[in-house]
């Protein structure tokens, strides 16, 4: 699958490089207009920028609840970094430091190893609501986050991209010029294929 997608992208580059590559980048980007929401979900990864964006949204009054979903920590990671705080704890401390009331931060009890599990845990925790939920993510992850949420919940979602981040991960016009950004884009397309197939590959690395 990786070889097929890489070959297709290479062929597109040869035929008409810049316009098509830009289109491939912009397809992945979703950044919706804001409106009052029931909660702000800080998707895993992108620390500390996603938590900072959520704190700004909270301060501006778009929602009074911020939700965090703990990620699964592997045994190897625990062995190598035994004293490092999990990302959700770091994000929670950052939210509080930037004005979010501790009582307005909800930490979901379950753990998630990928976007599908993360959004499913969040949806189960939030339940039914008449207001939308704001999903805070970054760069090329917006499209997949939105499509995944729509598969598991009828609650409307607002995708909000973090405003502070490495330029490479927020530049659809030049993503192929950076190895890191190109890897992220390729990962997103592979993950979208996996999602459309019903997510049979549970081991797709969560490059979020």
Image: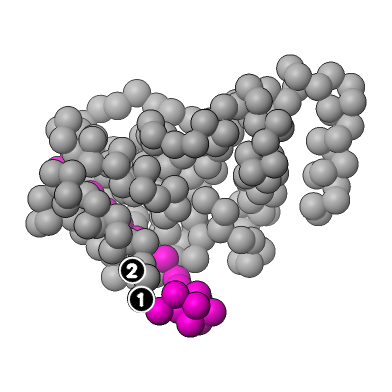
How would you rate the neighbour count of disc 1 (Cα within 10 Å): few for under 14, some for 14-19, many for 20 or more?
few
| Residue 200 on the magenta span | no
Q: Which residues are magenta?
A: 64-82
Q: Nearer the viewer, residue 75 or 144?
A: 75
Q: Which residue is mark 2?
A: 85
Q: Nearer the viewer, residue 172 or 191?
A: 172
- Tell me the quadrant of the picture where the N terminus can be found: bottom right
At x 79%, y 52%, the residue is 2
At x 63%, y 22%, the residue is 173
User: How many labels sit on residues?
Assistant: 2
At x 10%, y 56%, the residue is 103
- Residue 47, compared with residue 117, is above or below; it is above
Q: Secondary structure at mark 1?
A: loop
Q: Nearer the viewer, mark 1 or mark 2?
A: 1
- Residue 173, compared with residue 115, is above or below; it is above
Residue 12 position in % (x across, y down): 84, 28
| Residue 81 on the magenta span | yes
Q: Give the distance between the C-alpha atoms of the residues marked 1 and 2, in whole angstroms.
A: 6 Å
Residue 202 position in % (x across, y down): 61, 66
Indicate the quadrant where residue 23 lies.
top right
Q: Which residue is mark 1?
A: 83
Indicate the quadrant where residue 26 lies.
top right
- Residue 46, compared with residue 102, is above or below; it is above
- Residue 3, compared with residue 204, is above or below; it is above
- Horizontal relation, residue 67 to residue 157: left or right: left
Q: Nearer the viewer, residue 86 or 150?
A: 86
Residue 144 position in % (x across, y down): 54, 43
Does residue 175 appear in this view? yes
């Amino acid at each position: 699958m990786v070889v097929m997608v890489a070959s297709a992208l290479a062929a597109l580059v040869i035929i008409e490089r810049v316009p098509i590559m830009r289109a491939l980048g912009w397809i992945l980007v979703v950044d919706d207009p804001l409106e009052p929401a029931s909660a702000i979900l800080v998707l895993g990864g992108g620390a500390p920028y996603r938590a900072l964006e959520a704190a700004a949204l909270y301060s501006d009054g778009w929602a009074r609840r911020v939700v965090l979903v703990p990620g699964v920590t592997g045994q190897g990671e625990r062995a190598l970094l035994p004293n490092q705080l999990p990302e959700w704890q770091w994000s929670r401390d950052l939210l509080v430091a930037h004005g979010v009331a501790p009582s307005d931060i909800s930490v979901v009890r379950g753990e998630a190893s990928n976007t599908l599990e993360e959004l499913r845990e969040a949806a189960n925790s939030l339940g039914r609501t008449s207001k939308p939920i704001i999903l805070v993510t970054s760069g090329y992850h917006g499209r997949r986050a939105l499509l995944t949420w729509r598969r598991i919940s009828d609650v409307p979602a607002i995708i909000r991209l973090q405003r502070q981040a490495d330029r490479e991960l927020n530049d659809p016009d030049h993503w192929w010029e950076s190895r890191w950004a190109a890897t992220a884009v390729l990962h997103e397309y592979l993950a979208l294929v996996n999602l459309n197939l019903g997510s049979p590959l549970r081991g797709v690395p969560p490059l979020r």
